[in-house]
Image: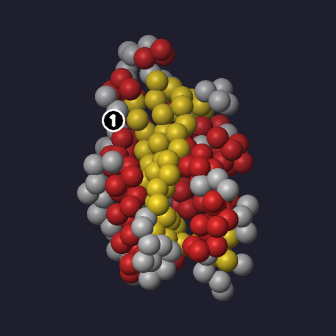
Amino acid sequence: MKEIVVATKNKGKAKEFEKLFSAHGFQVKTLLDYPEIGEVEETGTTFEENAVLKAEAVSKQLNHPVIADDSGLIVDALEGRPGIYSARYAGAEKSDEANMDKVLNELKGIPDEKRIARFYCALAVALPGQSTYTVFGTCEGEILSERRGNNGFGYDPIFYVYEKKRAMAELSSEEKNSISHRAKALEKLGQDIEMILSGVGVDE
Ligand SMILES: O=c1[nH]c(=O)c2ncn([C@@H]3O[C@H](COP(=O)(O)OP(=O)(O)OP(=O)(O)O)[C@@H](O)[C@H]3O)c2[nH]1
Ligand SMILES: [Mg+2]
């Protein structure tokens, strides 16, 4: 089976990519398989910049093609926060529970129609010796007033997905993978995906 390296240490993302890429016949390796690779500092000011930083840094270290994901939650009533700071919104320990509590507290008393939000995912594909390619995807919804469901990761329990009329954490992994920002970004690679991945894949 061909392998694809995704430059993430996030177990939730890793699981989603495993399923998304298995549909294309690829086995996913992540930074959890390469403990020697340190954290890449996310110093960019956009999701795209951070995705490129992660993909290129890891591609250089491994000297092979790498995909990276930089993603997050954008809440209109919070002027776009937590945005690129989604993982660390409530502090460096990256606690999903503390992050959700912070968003829920900031939105206390805000009515449903003003709780509009979206998930955003930028994917960068870094191929050694070639320019890095980026695509993005979004998923529209609203911030609930309390948690619902146990699936997924991150802010999934407090995100109501318009397309499914349920919280993201109430969706099965198959359902999430059919509508998520991550899946939509991958879809944008469209018909190019097999071609790009045939360059990205590393034969075992
Ligand atoms: O409920 C969610 N469902 C999702 O589908 C989702 N995708 C992203 N996020 C949030 O945004 C941060 C990404 O930040 P991020 O791209 O820097 O990733 P990360 O730091 O977790 O891992 P890495 O990939 O950088 O190693 C994550 O930690 C989450 O808080 C999500 N939350
Ligand atoms: Mg990160």
x and y percent of residue 182 in the render? 56, 49
Label 1 CB, ligand 1: below 8 Å? no
x and y percent of residue 121 in the render? 48, 47
**Is 172 drawn above or below residue 80 in the view shown?**
below
> Could you tell me if residue 62 is visible in this image?
no
> Could you tell me if residue 83 is visible in this image?
yes
The quadrant the C terminus occupies is: bottom right
Q: Residue at x 60, y 37 (%)?
A: 168
x and y percent of residue 109 in the render? 38, 15
Rendering colour mode: secondary structure
> How many numbered discs, if any?
1
Of residue 128 and residue 121, the one placed in the foreground of this image is: 128
The quadrant the N terminus occupies is: bottom right
**Is 77 drawn above or below residue 198 in the view shown?**
above
Name the secondary structure under disc 1: loop
Q: Quadrant of residue 172?
A: top right
Q: Residue at x 64, y 61 (%)?
A: 193
Q: Quadrant of residue 140?
A: top right
Q: Which residue is mark 1?
A: 81
Q: Residues within 10 Å of mark 1 (few under 14, many from 20)?
A: some
* Amino acid under disc 1: Arg
* 156 to the left or right of 165: left
Q: Residue at x 43, y 53 (%)?
A: 70
Q: Residue at x 69, y 44 (%)?
A: 178
x and y percent of residue 203 in the render? 65, 83
* 160 to the left or right of 103: right
